[in-house]
Amino acid sequence: MCLATVFKESDNTVICKNVSRLDVDGDKIIIRDIMGDERVVEGKILMVDLANSVVKLECN
């Protein structure tokens, strides 16, 4: 299983760990972790590094 950590690009803070799913709905990104908890942020995906399980977002 490949789980990701989602970072805010501007200051490299962690938004969420153990992320199993990302959904994009316009300018909203729905982040779901392995426990099923969801977090919604406004912004866009800047980078996904599958080898290192890292996602960087630009948050509004």
Image: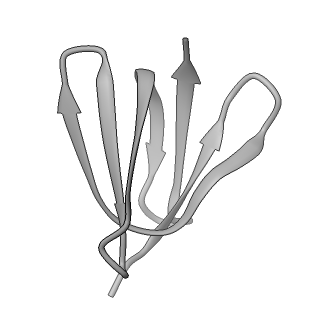
Image x and y of residue 22, in percent: 28, 49
39 or 55, nearer to the observer: 39
Left or right, 51 with respect to 8, comes to left
Left or right, 24 with respect to 15, comes to left
Position of 37 relative to 13 (above/below):
below
Q: How is the image coloured?
A: one colour
- Residue drawn at the location 37% of the way across and 81% of the way down: 35
- Residue drawn at the location 37% of the way across and 67% of the way down: 37
Left or right, 30 with respect to 10, comes to left
Give the mark count.
Answer: 0
- Residue drawn at the location 55% of the way across and 20% of the way down: 58
Residue that lies at the very extreme toward the right in this rendered image: 11
Image x and y of residue 42, in percent: 42, 21
Quarter holding the C terminus is: top right
Image x and y of residue 18, in percent: 49, 74
Residue that lies at the very extreme toward the bottom in this rendered image: 1
Determine which quarter of the picture holds residue 2: bottom left
Image x and y of residue 13, in percent: 77, 43
- Residue drawn at the location 56% of the way across and 65% of the way down: 52
Determine which quarter of the picture holds residue 30: top left
Quarter holding the N terminus is: bottom left
Position of 11 relative to 52 (above/below):
above
Position of 44 relative to 23 (above/below):
above
